[in-house]
Amino acid sequence: MSTDTSTPVRGVRGFARRHSLGVAAAISAVALGLVFAVVGGVVPETALPRAPAAVVDAIPTLNAVVSLAALATILGGVRAARGRDYEAHRRFMLATTALFAAFLVMYLYRIALVGTTEFGGPAAVERFVYLPLLGVHIVLAIVCVPLVAYVLTLAATRPLGDLFDTAHARVGRIAASLWFVSFALGVVVYALLYHVY
């Protein structure tokens, strides 16, 4: 990653520009720490406001819809970048980030209130299909956090012309691919949990 020293940028943006990797690592650590705290039961259910049961029950379906929308925005962002329409690319990827944040908030809220959903299908399907798919989905979602935080930090702290001198495109391609697969697997996991079995 190169740093443009011809145009000094001060303040928080300047700091983030000079230390993009460290800022992305800090954002990732905080985000993943929050996820693991909620999933690990560190955040007590009583610390959260209780939505009506119908809302809590609807979260998995809402998250499946969010995931499908994110698949579309990722594809749109990739297509825009390939067509050198960088403004559309920015809008699509910011939309994907917002969708991911919405997914995560709803998912963690439901986990904190009711815990995980048990798989209702046959043990063989659970062992050889459901759990491997769920595992890959979770690992990719975790891996995507620092990658996405890094490319967003690069994009937020530099003008477009300077991004070409960074790892934004290379890391972004990897992040988008993994993000796409993670969202797609999330939809498959949802279908297995709530519709197939």
Image: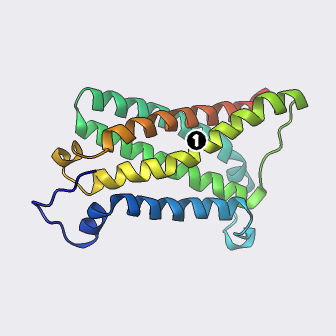
Which scheme is used to colour this image of the protein? rainbow
Circle 1 crowding by C-alpha within 10 Å: few under 14, some 14–19, many from 20: many
Q: Is residue 131 left or right of residue 107?
A: right
Task: Say what secondary structure mark 1 lies in.
Answer: helix
Give the residue at the far left of this rendering: 6
Count of numbered labels shown in the rendering: 1
Q: Is residue 63 left or right of residue 135?
A: left
**Amino acid type indicated by mark 1:** Leu
Answer yes or no: is residue 60 visible.
yes
Q: Is residue 125 left or right of residue 50?
A: right
Q: Is residue 48 above or below residue 183?
A: below
Q: Residue at x 33, y 27 (%)?
A: 79
Q: Is residue 4 above or below residue 88?
A: below
Give the x, y percent position of residue 41: 74, 65
Using the image as rendered, state which of residue 187 and residue 37 is in the foreground: 37
Answer yes or no: is residue 51 visible.
no
Using the image as rendered, state which of residue 49 and residue 190 is in the foreground: 190
Give the x, y percent position of residue 152: 36, 51
Q: Residue at x 51, y 45 (%)?
A: 144
| Mark 1, residue position | 140
Q: Is residue 32 left or right of residue 56?
A: left
Give the x, y percent position of residue 91: 32, 42
Give the x, y percent position of residue 77: 35, 34
Q: Residue at x 64, y 44 (%)?
A: 138
In what quadrant of the picture does the C terminus appear?
A: top right
Q: Residue at x 22, y 30 (%)?
A: 84
Give the residue at the far right of this rendering: 123
